[in-house]
Amino acid sequence: MGTAAASSVATTLKALAEPLRLRMLSAIATDPRGEACVCDLAELTEVSQPTVSHHLKVMKDAGLLASERRGTWVWYRVVASRKNAVTALLDSFAPATLLEDVESEQDRAVALRTMDARVTRLADELADELSELNRDLVTAIVRESYAGLVRSAKLTQHMIPLTERFARQRLADLMRDREISVPQVLFVCVANAGRSQLAAALMNQLSGGTVIARSAGSNPAVDVHPSVRSLLTEIEGDKDAATAFPKPLTDDAVRAADVVITMGCGDVCPIIPGVRYEDWAVGDPALASDDGARAIRDDIATRVHTLLDTLTT
């Protein structure tokens, strides 16, 4: 990184190096209106409104926010040219700093050296089981699934069962017959560690099998965030929640879906003709308080109910 670039990035990071500013930036970025009033932001904390205005001015001076006065109040929004950077901060960097890496690099290297043979064995077993599919296709899907997961996997000891689950899901998507299948929805966010996991779990629960829900991430995290996993446990039960894992976004998942709901990835999703797209601007439960995470879950549940009505009537 050059001197000028490093100086610019450091200035931005310095402007954000305060908890309240990060919370306000998150609130503005995830507001469904695309902007937030200073009166709304003042409710995030018990500090005075002049203090809130000071923090907002710091972020505005750093080029992150733009403002507009309307009557008594000032409204703030993320500057268009900074939206990608803010999304990366809130959806990738921030959640990743809250997750614990529990496998040492040395242990990981040792485990990966033995993994190729196990992946080959898994591919052979699935090809034997799914004999109606081309054997080379099954092998390719298994190896692609493993490669997509291992980049962000936290624990290599779980790689083979996770690879099998992901490969089976992808193969099912490839074989899906739209004429006879129930509707399928794909929920996508950047990390696939929070919003999209909750949305898929809620859709599968509320639909009672009349709709199939998948989830994926354009840049998957190493694990589902702990606060989100506790919410998944309430929805799915201990066993299913314990097996939730972030998955990379693939073209075949998009092609198999009737509806794709983006929840933070924006135009990262491939555009496939015949697939319906929606974008839900909801908060990130991975960064919220317990009460805030439950409020976000309830917001997602309301949206899922509305979507479900359009798919089953």
Image (cartoon, rainbow, N blue to C red):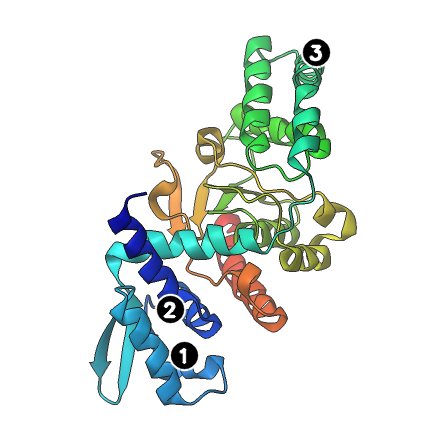
Q: What's under tag 3, amino acid-wise?
A: Asp
Is 153 above or below relative to 132? below
Observer-side mark, 1 or 3, equals: 1
Give the mark nearer the N terminus: 1 vs 2. 2
Q: Residues within 10 Å of mark 3 (few under 14, many from 20)?
A: few
The residue indicated by pointer 1 is: 41
Q: Nearer the viewer, mark 3 or mark 2?
A: 2
- The reply to whether the C-beta atoms of the residues labelled 1 and 2 are less than 8 Å apart is yes
Task: Name the N-terminal-most of marks 3 and 2.
Answer: 2
**Judging from the image, what secondary structure is the residue with disc 3 in?**
helix
Residue 28 tag number:
2
User: Picture coordinates of residue 26 (x, y %)?
Assistant: 43, 66
Q: Name which of mark 1 and mark 3 comes first in the sequence.
A: 1
Amino acid on which the number 2 mark rests in the picture: Ile
Residue 10 horizontal side relative to residue 165, left or right: left
Label 1 to label 2, Cα distance in Å? 8 Å
Say which residue appears at 33% left-offset and 82% top-offset: 53
Where disc 1 sits, the SS reads helix
The quadrant the N terminus occupies is top left
Q: Is residue 38 visible?
A: no
Relative vertical location of residue 184 with respect to residue 255 in this rendering, above or below: below
Identify the residue under disc 3: 128
Which quadrant of the view contains residue 87? Answer: bottom left
Of residues 109 and 289, the one drawn nearer to the viewer in this rendering? 109
